[in-house]
Image (cartoon, rainbow, N blue to C red):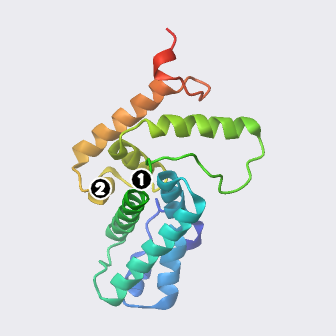
Amino acid sequence: MNNRDGNAGELLSESVVRRACAGEPQAFEALCLHFEKPLFGYLYGMLRNAHSAQDAVQETLLRVFRMTREGRLNWQPALVRSLVFSIAHNIAVDELRRARVRPLPEREPAEPINPAEQALAREQIDQALARLPESHRSALMLRVWGELTYAEIADSLGATQAEVKIWLYRARKRLAELLDRDGQYIEPNTKSV
């Protein structure tokens, strides 16, 4: 398995996780490379700032590294994935509280976006996401960016699987209400019939 693809949906091999937990540097590097892109996507979605998201990725991986050094990291791949995103979520929430800003301030593009239509669509989606409750937005971001299962999202957010399913259903339903078929944001007061 290629651990450099950055797809958190694919489990790391048990061997790589065991070796990382045992303190093997190459295995821990493979673990970091595996989670780096999905973590950045999730954290960027939460923090809406590329620099803050990158800092949060580094802090997440540093905490995971400390856990391996202290022997507190479970070697089961599925549990490692859930733990990594749980740590990332807590860091994002702490950052948002510390900054005392709305959960989704205006988005900074991580890289230049060429088509103007794509930028407009992203802005429209951001506006709609900003209207979701934090629990719904977090569950949706973990599902989309982190590719976590319902059980992993529940573990990450300290909720039950039933709550996660409800949050995801309500988040998707609300987004469908707020966005038209072309992805254009519809102001709740001006929605036409």
Which percent across, then down, holds residue 156? 31, 59
Disc number for residue 157: 2
Label 1 neighbour load within 10 Å: few <14, some 14-19, many 20+: many
Read off the residue under disc 1: 142
Splitting the image into 4 quarters, where does residue 87 fall? bottom left
Q: Residue placed at 48% from the left, 59% from the top?
A: 43
Task: Say what secondary structure mark 2 lies in.
Answer: helix
Say whether marks 1 and 2 touch (CB < 8 Å).
Answer: yes
In the rendered image, the residue lying farthest to the top is 193
Disc 1 marks a residue whose amino acid type is Leu
Q: Position of residue 63 (x, y in %)?
A: 39, 78
Q: Residue at x 24, y 48 (%)?
A: 161
Image vertical order of residue 84 relative to residue 116, above or below: below
Q: Position of residue 34 (x, y in %)?
A: 52, 70
Residue 1 can be seen in this image:
no
Give 159 or 119, whichever is nearer the viewer: 119
Say which quarter of the image contains residue 165. Answer: top left
Q: Give the residue type at disc 2.
A: Leu
> In the structure shown, which secondary structural element does the residue marked by tag 1 occupy?
helix
Q: CA distance from mark 1 to mark 2?
A: 10 Å
- Give the residue drawn at x 44%, y 59%: 99
Q: How many other residues sit within 10 Å of disc 2, few (<14), some (14-19) or many (≥20)?
A: many
Q: Position of residue 116 (x, y in %)?
A: 75, 38
Whether residue 109 is visible to the viewer of this picture, yes or no, is yes
Name the one closer to the observer, 3 or 134: 134
